[in-house]
Image (cartoon, helix red, strand yellow):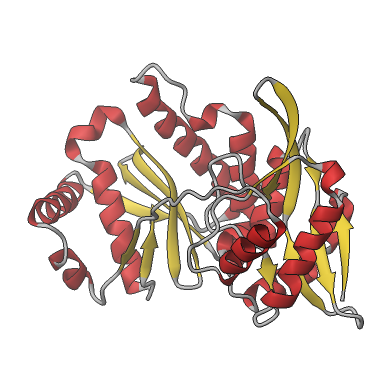
Amino acid sequence: MRVDCISSAQEFHALQSEWNALLAASRSDSVFLTWEWLSAWWESYGAGKQLLVLVAREDQGMLLGIAPLYVEKFRLMGRKRRRLRFLGDGSSDSDYLDFVILRGEEENVLPAFLQQLDRLKSDWDVAQWNEIPGTSPNLALLRGWLARQGWFFREEEVPCGVVTLREGWEGYVGSLKPRFRTAVRASLRNLQQWPGRIERLGEEKQREAWLRTLFELHGGRWQLRGQHGVFADPRKREFYRRMSQAFLALGWLHFTRCSVHDSVLACQFGFVYRNTYCQLQEGFDTASGHAGPGIALRAATIRQLIEGGVRQYDF
C-alpha cells in the first residue's frame, strides 16, 4: 500500500471519478463527504488554505482510502499556528465528516494515514477533526493510535437531531406532541384557505431566483435582531450556488417553498441522500409569521418526503 499527498486543486478534481464509489463502499457514507459537496465547499471557501488530501492505494492502484484534509492558519494564545481540519469543516455547513476508507480496511489504512501525517508534522501544528459520527469505526482506531503515540487530545460530544418518519402522513402527525400536532394542522388549513401552494424546485433555470429568495427571507429574520445572518458572507452564497447546481443535476436537491399568489412566504433548502433528508437552511416572510408559513412548509415537505419513501429527517 502507498499513501500519496494531494495538494493541488487539479489533483483533487482528478479524483472525482473514484471518490463517490469509494464513499459508497465505506462505512462513512454521507452526503457531506461526497465529491460534489466537498469540491463545491473548497471552491467557495478554499482561499488562503492549503489542501492536504491523503490517498491510499494498493500496489495495483485500487483506491483504499481518502483523508480529506486541509491546513489553515489561525492564532492560538497570540501566536500564529497551522490547523489541520477536514474538508467541509470551519463554515458551519457540514456534518458527519470522517476519513473515507474501504469497508474492512480501516485497521490498515487509518494507521497509514496517521503515520503519514506524523511525517508531515512540519506542515501543521494542531489537528482539529470535527463532526466524526459516534458510530464511525475510525473513531476507536483514532483514539487508540493517539493514546499509543502519547498525543494530547480532547473530545467533545455534540448531539444531532434526527427523526424517523413513520409510514403514512397520519401516522407521523399522530406521533407528534398534541401542541405541535395542532400547530401543524392549523398551518396547513391556513395554507388551503389563502389559497397557497407548495412548490419544489425542478428546473435549473429557476434555481438562481429561488436561491435569491432564500437568501432574502433568511436574512430578513436576522435583520430584525440587528444582525446580518449567514448569507451576508459571499462565500456562503457561492457555496450554495455551486452545491445546489450539482445536487439538482443528480436529483438530490429537495428545495421547497410556500407561496400565496406571487409572494413567496417561506423557503426550505435540503437534500435527499441514501433515504435521508437533510434540512440545511430555511427562511420565511417575517410579516406573515403569525400565519405560520414556515410550519406549513416544513409539514408539507415532510408529507412529500414520506410519500416519496424517505424514512429519516435530519436537522
Camera-side residue of 293 and 74: 74
Camera-side residue of 304 and 196: 304
Expressed as whole percent of the image width and height from the top left, the position of residue 136 reads: 54, 68
Q: Is residue 305 left or right of residue 166?
A: right
Camera-side residue of 62 and 299: 62
Q: Residue at x 54, y 45 (%)?
A: 93
For the question of whether residue 13 can be seen, the reply is: no
Expressed as whole percent of the image width and height from the top left, the position of residue 137 reads: 57, 72
Camera-side residue of 76 and 130: 76
Q: Is residue 100 left or right of residue 180?
A: right
Q: Is residue 278 left or right of residue 238?
A: left
Q: Residue at x 17, y 48 (%)?
A: 187
Q: Residue at x 55, y 47 (%)?
A: 154
**In the rendered image, the vertical position of residue 222 relative to residue 44, given as above or below:** above
Expressed as whole percent of the image width and height from the top left, the position of residue 97 reads: 59, 57
Figure disc tally: 0
